[in-house]
Image: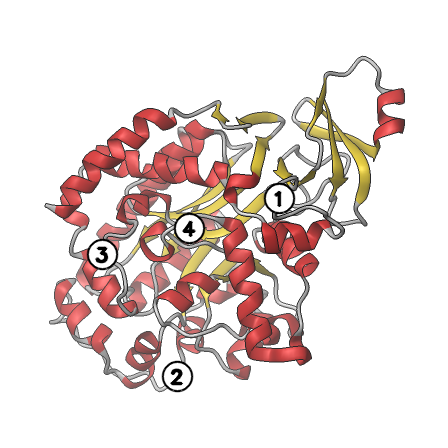
Amino acid sequence: MLLLARYVLPVSHPHLEDGAVLVRDGAILALGSRVDMLRDYPDEEVVDYGLAALMPGFVDLHTHMEYTIFRGVVDDLPYTEWKMAVQGREHLLTEQDWEDSAVLGAIEAIRSGITTVADITDSGASVKAAQDSGLRGVLYREVSTMDTASVDRVMAEALADIDDWTARTDSSRITIGIAPHGPYTCHPRLFQALVAEVEKRDRPVTIHLAGSKDEYDFVKYGSSPLGQDFREQSGWSDQPWMPTGVSPVRYVYQWGILDLPNVLAVHCVHVDAEDIDVLKRTDTAVAYCARCNAKLAMGTAPFGDFRAAELRVGIGTDSPASTSTIDFFEEMLVGLLIQRGIRGEQGFYTAKEFITMATLGGARALKMDHLIGSLEPGKRADIIAVDLSKSHQVPTQNPYGALVHTCNMDNVLMTMVDGRVLFDRGKYLTLDRASMSERAEQLRDKMRG
């Protein structure tokens, strides 16, 4: 198949105008000018997207697809209150509800041009949604408990799920990892048990880390709403907790989590220079979730300091429960504008830098850049086509600027993973959007009840 468009953005190399990408057997075979590629491959099926950009699919470095049905249910609350309100409604959902919610998330991700998700799930619903939809992903089994007596059971259940999910998914697209939820929900014994198992099983790890001021105060000083109201709601109020006197990053570091070989830290808003040095020394990747952090009043991650330290950084949308949408274009735009507004000309990041972070940066964060993240011969054909022909986009001079500053998920024309088209000009080819939309209304009524 020969894909044509006005712009081809390999990301790892300068963009091509009037370019083409040749896809065969799920991989990228060649790139070049439209004229040359049509001449050299006259027998290929040709798909011309016109005034559009062909580029690598987005890598969503942090999401919870199974929480899509919580969109708008808990709005306009700061982080701790929001967290408790969401947790207080989780019991309303059945196993089927979680699965349907995750499918809704997968539909939205595909529509947004996301081809790889780094998703945290407790129920396993996101695993099934990723497998059935054709998405690529790293799906992390979440674990948490502050009850030391429950650690062995929690780990045994998680390991059983990991083995089961691994057996039921396509290992060429889906990797199963493990996710200790965060410093305020995991007993040190759970961290120790997890480290021991990961060292034996070689699984990727992700953790919510240093996201909110409440988390920081709870870990360092032992007092915050997370240390009182949330722990009581979670049934852990009788578990003793002493102030650690250190930041969340340095706290989890002392339990060996960050020394594991493939760790992704999510948020990292409340970090200082010493924390960033720890992340650098341990080669810990970071997911930058600008919209979630802003909407829930968590603060703003020191993105410029991450870049200065040469950390592996990518972009995460978090869940629709917090950000309302899985629109990756909006995530890039908000993330870019926040940094420009805070840092001014001294830290002026460009649209091209954010496109790179959204694709190749995310792939590097997951240690998958040998497979995805850029359009290069030999890499997997995870490709999207994005329309740039609308009235608010023409004339288009700079495709990177147009993608970040004028596009949204409705501009995505095509989403492809492993050479398989998942979405094409309004049609979902792997999932039934119509039935899921009807199901969403039923779930919404249940959430209101």
What amino acid is at disc 4?
Thr
Local crowd size for mark 2, using a 10 Å CA cut-off: few (<14), some (14–19), many (≥20): some
Instruction: Give the CA separation, mark 1 to mark 2.
Output: 53 Å
Q: Distance between the residues labelled 4 and 1?
A: 32 Å
Judging depth in this view, the residue of 144 and 54 nearest the camera is: 54
Q: Quadrant of residue 40?
A: top right
Residue 113 visible in this rendered orientation of the protein: no
Name the residue carrying label 2.
246
Q: Work out which quarter of the rendered image holds the C terminus and state it.
A: top left
Give the Cα separation between the discs numbered 3 and 4. 15 Å
Q: Position of residue 281 (x, y in %)?
A: 60, 72
Q: What element carries label 1?
A: loop
Q: Which residue is label 3 attached to?
A: 86
Callout 3–callout 2 Cβ contact below 8 Å = no
Residue situated in front as seen by the camera: 354 or 91: 354
Q: What residue appears at the point 20 percent right and 63 percent down from the top-left corner? A: 84
Q: Is residue 327 left or right of residue 392?
A: left
Which-is-in-front pick, marks 2 and 4? 4
For the residues labelled 2 and 4, the Cα–Cα distance comes to 28 Å
In the current view of this chain or complex, which residue is farthest to the top? 43
Q: Which of marks 4 and 1 is in front?
A: 1
